[in-house]
Amino acid sequence: MRQERSTLLWCTLVMAACSDAPKPAAQAPPPHLASDAAPADLSKLKANIPPPLADTFTPLASLHVEKIPDAPAALMDAAEREEGISRFCYQEYGQKADPKLVGAVALVVTVDDNVIQSVRVGADDWSSKAGSAVNRCLVQKAPQAWRLLPGDHVAAGRYVVQLRFRPS
């Protein structure tokens, strides 16, 4: 208690002493700089800039964008029948890493001889990086799980199957 009082008294004395100190005089503005250069014609000055580099841009000769058709009804039915595998990939690989994960993926499905041969991701839009694990799972598991019914016929080719995911 006694030390607190002496510290408080000391601080009060220092503040009082500082408030009575003379204020420093306002600084005068710097003197005008003398102009030691005569007017110059800047158009006659030589620049010390290296020459420009050659342009490295080369336009594409032609950009071919292939239009992949949407999946026919029989292929969409197979994807919907086995929705559980898509939900499994989303919950196990996506939501466990990010419970609020939402997104969509467009799968390019290759069909030959009325059998799903392969699946790859054509495009995706996820709310976080956890969606990439869902993509990998879908690419691996969808060709094994999606089966066309015996009476269905899907012409050989590539088709887009779009899937959307959000927490339930």
Image: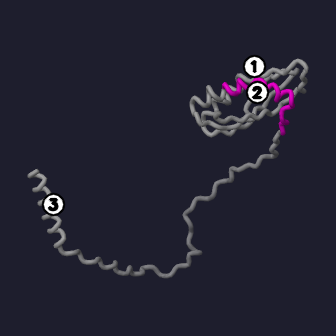
Amino acid residing under circle 1: Gln
The front one of 60 and 124 is: 124
Residue 51 screen position, x and y as percent: 61, 59
Residue 82 shown in magenta: yes
Question: Which residues make up the magenta segment?
Answer: 67-88
Q: Extreme left residue here?
A: 2
The residue positioned 83% from the left and 27% from the top of the image is: 75
From what the image shows, is residue 87 above or below residue 59?
above
Image quadrant holding the C terminus, namely top right
* N-terminal-most mark, 3 or 2: 3
Residue 100 screen position, x and y as percent: 59, 37
Amino acid residing under circle 2: Val
Q: Which residue is mark 2?
A: 119
From what the image shows, is residue 48 above or below residue 107?
below
Amino acid residing under circle 3: Cys
The numbered disc on residue 11 is 3
Q: Secondary structure at mark 1?
A: helix
Magenta span: chief secondary structure: helix
Residue 23 screen position, x and y as percent: 22, 75
Q: Secondary structure at mark 2?
A: strand
In which quadrant of the rendered view does residue 95 lie? Answer: top right
The residue positioned 81% from the left and 46% from the top of the image is: 61
In which quadrant of the rendered view does residue 13 lie? Answer: bottom left
- Local packing at callout 2 (Cα closer than 10 Å; few below 14, some 14-19, many 20+) is many
Q: Which residue is mark 1?
A: 144
